[in-house]
Every structure is written in C-alpha cells, then in structure tokens.
Image (cartoon, rainbow, N blue to C red):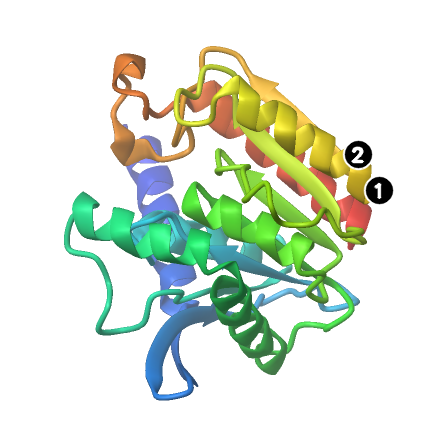
Amino acid sequence: MKLKTLLFLAMVSSLMTGYAQLATVDYKDGEQNLSGFGIKPQNGLKEKPGVLILPAWMGIDEHSKESAAELAKLGYYAFVADIYGVDKRPKNASEAGKNAGYYKQKFTDYQRRIQLALDQLVKLGANPDKIVVMGYCFGGTGALEAARGNLKVQGAVSFHGGLGKDASRAANKINTKILVLHGADDPYVPKAEVDAFQAEMKSSGADWQMVFYANAVHAFTHKDAGNDNSKGAAYNELADKRSWIAFKDFLKEVL
C-alpha cells in the first residue's frame, strides 16, 4: 500500500512539474492580443525540434496543455497556439462553432495565425528547420491548412480533424509530409470528404498517410468527451494510445 502511495505521489509530482514549465506567451496579430503557452524540454533533443499544437474548437484547453507537457518530456520544444484571441474565446459550443467556422472559410486568416504561433515556437528555441504542426479536431483542420499553405513545417498531423476544403480552391503542390489519424466511424467527416481529401493529396503530390481506428468517432483523444459513440464524439482509449504512438513515430521520421 505504501509503495502504491509513493508511486501515485511521484506521478502527480511529475504532472505538476510538467505544467509548471508551461509559460504564458503573449503576442499579437495586428491589434488582436493573443496568448499561448510555451514549454522548453529539460533534456532537449540534439537538433532542437519543435511541435506546434493547434487546439480543438473551444480553444486552448487542458488536452492541448497536456500534449505540450508530454512532448517536452520527449525532448521537443512545444507551443500551444491561440487562434481566436484573448477576448474571443468561446464560452459554449455555439460560439465555438461560429469561431471555427470563420477560420475554416477564411483559411488565409487561419494560416496567418498559425504562422504567428510558429514564430513564437522558434523564439522559444525550436529549430525553424525542424518543426511539426499538429492539431485536434478544428486544430487538425489547421494542421492541414499549414500544409496546404506550404508554411515552413516538415510535417502536419491531424487528430480526428476535418479534412475538407472548398472545391473551388486549387490543389497546390504540398511539400509537407502529412499524417491523418482518423476515427473510422466519425460521423462528422463523411465518406465523400475522405475521398475528396485523398484525391487532393494525390493530385498535390504530397507524402501522406491516413490511419483509421476501429470503433472510434470524433474527438477520440479527448477524455472529457465521454464514451458514448452514439453522440458522434467520444473518447476511445485504444485509439488514443495507438494514435499517439503513430504520432511519435512520425516525429522521429520527419524531424
């Protein structure tokens, strides 16, 4: 019993240490105040690689912060981007839908906010030639937009993100390596959208991978999403673990 208590305390201490290293970083897009979170690894990898994290549609959350802390433990510089702005963070799903919808339509604004966050990651100490951008849900869409805009990143990773883009947009050549981690039963991303995305990847000449996870729906990495697949968004522990392993393998390959 005593050993279990000590192990639990050690785990809590480790988590608290990780969060303690997360530092608020204030920056701007013109007159719009933005505020993200940065973290430096205590034992960084030799080439100082970095990972930019794009949060889901509610904006910066515990999930994105946890990911940053975990990446720092692996030796990566990490930065959690503020896409909306300090005074525009949604208070509910309705506001989140409007905010996310705006950036999906105004994709150049989304790409600009991503670039500003990338700049902060580099200022933190990350090697500008060794960066991957990843995102959850709405943030996964952003990771793909970073690739479509050919921002200076070596890789783009989407966790259960939207894949679509306006059909009128040209499929430009994509130089960034792409990894899409997708719930096989995600009702928010219909088959037509998946097919169109794969066609886009082929026509753009991208180096891309797409992994489907059985019995997984939208938001399968979010522990606060519950576990009722019938709601369309739910946590799936196995898909969460498998996708994180795939992500780490991808980081080792491209960085």
Q: Is residue 231 above or below residue 104?
A: above
Q: What is the spatial separation of the Cα atoms under label 1 and label 2, in whole angstroms? A: 5 Å
Residue 93: image quadrant is top left
Q: Position of residue 196 (x, y in %)?
A: 63, 29
Q: Is residue 108 above or below residue 187?
A: below
Tell whether 61 sits left or right of 200. left
Q: Quadrant of the C terminus?
A: bottom right
Residue at the image position 32 percent from the left and 33 percent from the top: 223
Any part of residue 226 in sight: yes
Q: Position of residue 30 (x, y in %)?
A: 41, 87
Q: Position of residue 52 (x, y in %)?
A: 56, 61
Residue 29: image quadrant is bottom left
Dot 2: within a 10 Å radius of its alpha carbon, few (fewer than 14), some, or many (20 or more) residues? some
Residue position for label 1: 205
Confirm or deny contact between disc 1 and disc 2 (CB under 8 A): yes
Residue at the image position 72 percent from the left and 73 percent from the top: 128
Tell whether 50 sits left or right of 16. right
Q: Quadrant of the N terminus?
A: top left
Residue position for label 2: 202
